[in-house]
Amino acid sequence: MEQSELQTRISALERQITELPAGSVTKKTIKGREYFYHRWTEDGKRREKYIPLGEVNSFQEQIQHRKELETELKTLQKKPSKISRSKAHKTSEQFPAAEHDFAANVLLGESLRAYSASVRHYRKRECYQSLHDFIYGNISDKVFILYGLRRTGKTTMIRQILLQMNDEDLAKTAFIQVAPNNTLADINKDLHVLRQHGYCYVFLDEVTLMEDFIEGAALFSDVFAACGMKLVLSGTDSLGFLFTEDEQLYDRCITLHTTFIPYREFERVLGICGIDEYIRYGGTMSLGGVNYNEHSTFASKKSADEYVDSAIARNIQHSLRCYQYEGHFRSLQELYNKNELTSAINRVVEDINHRFTLEVLTRDFRSNDLGISAANLRRDRKSPTDILDQVDVAAVTDRLRQMLEIRNQTEQKVQLEAVHVSEIEEYLSLLDLTEKIDVISLASLDRKAYRTVIAQPGLRYAQADALIKSLLMDEKFSDLSLAQRNFVTERIRNEIKGRMMEDIVLLETKLANPKKSVFVLQFAIGEFDMVVFDEDSASCEIFEIKHSSQILPQQYRHLVDEKKCASTEHRYGTITGKYVLYRGESQQVGEIQYRNVEEYLKSL
């Protein structure tokens, strides 16, 4: 195997290993029943986490696969680690660092071409231009931080810019793949070697894996960026970068956060069209399509849970462990020590679109979706049914709770209090995973309310889909005909999609209009799904948001209600537009403008 291939394979193995569970699966017999647990060691402490019976085999396979990869990695690492001089690259003589034994995995020269080749046909995210401007602009004495949750395009953007470099620039470029066993001292030595041999552009991937990164990151700006090197630091530990920016790299870095992927990018970059596809899979750049990665992160409840655990919960825990020498866990310390923090985050993510309050975390879990769908089915104008009232709701809810791996209050080792909720909410917001949308009541303007929107809709939908699977297991429900079962489950899915579509529109409209107020406006009876208020012009626009492709008068009845409109204008100025956002074609219906929701989102 050529040295360039060897280094590429080592980097790939280390990346795969970090994404697989370490440790082992153990079995316990309690009162005649078998229970399985994932057991591993972290920071010298033994950790355990319950594994649902249906996932044991898959978990064991992942652990076995990790062991096989670790064995292969050890074998490859025993081979000579010097990076051979490229015969094909005429400028390699100018940069003898290629013969140096690096502490980390360093790719140089033609190895960078090989590393980048697979993204040749990928479309670029909108934020790519910021990275390009840093590399080729006149910015000095600062480092570039490229961060965001997993699978949001960070490493792909680096590979894309490597691919576009000319031979002269590429000969002065290095890519460092940081491993968990690397320290800041290791990277410091490697960077000194690269600087001494004229390397100008250095990309460091997964730098937050280093335990001492947060406390010593000033090294990158104060030493190497100050000497003229262009350093790009990337990683999935978003919270760690935020801690670093606040202290070590304060005012000495440019940041680019990749976590939020709006609908227009989902469609343009992935080549996948449709609001329903975005509802089901939106949030990462890993939906199979003609322009990007092959596998969807949120294709199933299991894969979505793995993402919550690895990309969100571990992100928070790793950053808190490394920041201020574990001195910033605050009230979450006990939850972390008893392995309860992930469970609390899972519960929050499932209920985030409805209520992010202490009550949600401490009460016995029950599904909001089920109750809302039951009420809507009872009053359906065409085919009313009370089938969901006949379903064993307690049994369905218990199965749903088990599917979501969410512990009831009686199962929690640590009592969750308001301070826990507040801190979890704070960290999820810092990760750009959530955004608060104000809910204003004209009847009581002093009452503060909001709805918390999740920025990755695929997470929400994957957990909602688990509800439907639980419902199908109910004895009463299984007695229905196939047509009846399909009708009920499709109705539930549409209810979920409808409310998620509202959240998506509210979130993207708010982010696209930072100088305006975007909120839900409630009346004594009914509400406007969205109001966009421009204080400078003393005007507003009012919206209804419908997950439908049909036009019906009941959809805009509130928009033409004279009392509601008069009350709104008294408070928020002249109404300059009345809109219904829906899935049909854009057209005018009297004073109401019907706009296709996908066209609207792409126009923001």
Image (cartoon, helix red, strand yellow):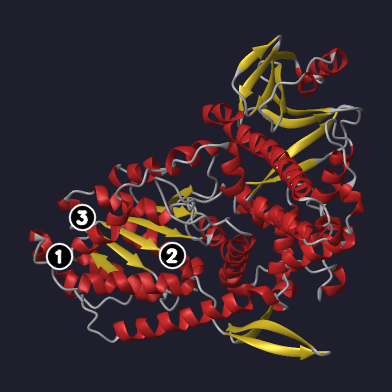
x then y, percent, for residue 150: 51, 58
Q: Type of residue at label 1?
A: Phe
- Which residue bears the numbered disc 1? 95
The residue sitting at 80% across, 29% down in the picture is 521
Of marks 2 and 3, which one's residue comes earlier in the chain?
Answer: 3
Q: Nearer the viewer, residue 526 or 209?
A: 526
x then y, percent, for residue 414: 81, 73
Secondary element under disc 1, as helix, strand or loop, is loop
Within 10 Å of disc 1 (Cα), the crowding (few <14, some 14-19, many 20+) is some
Q: Quadrant of residue 310?
A: bottom right
x then y, percent, for residue 257: 50, 49
The mark found on residue 252 in the picture is: none
Secondary element under disc 3, as helix, strand or loop, is helix
Of marks 1 and 2, which one's residue comes earlier in the chain?
Answer: 1
- Quick check: 310 above or below 145? below
Of marks 1 and 3, which one's residue comes earlier in the chain?
Answer: 1
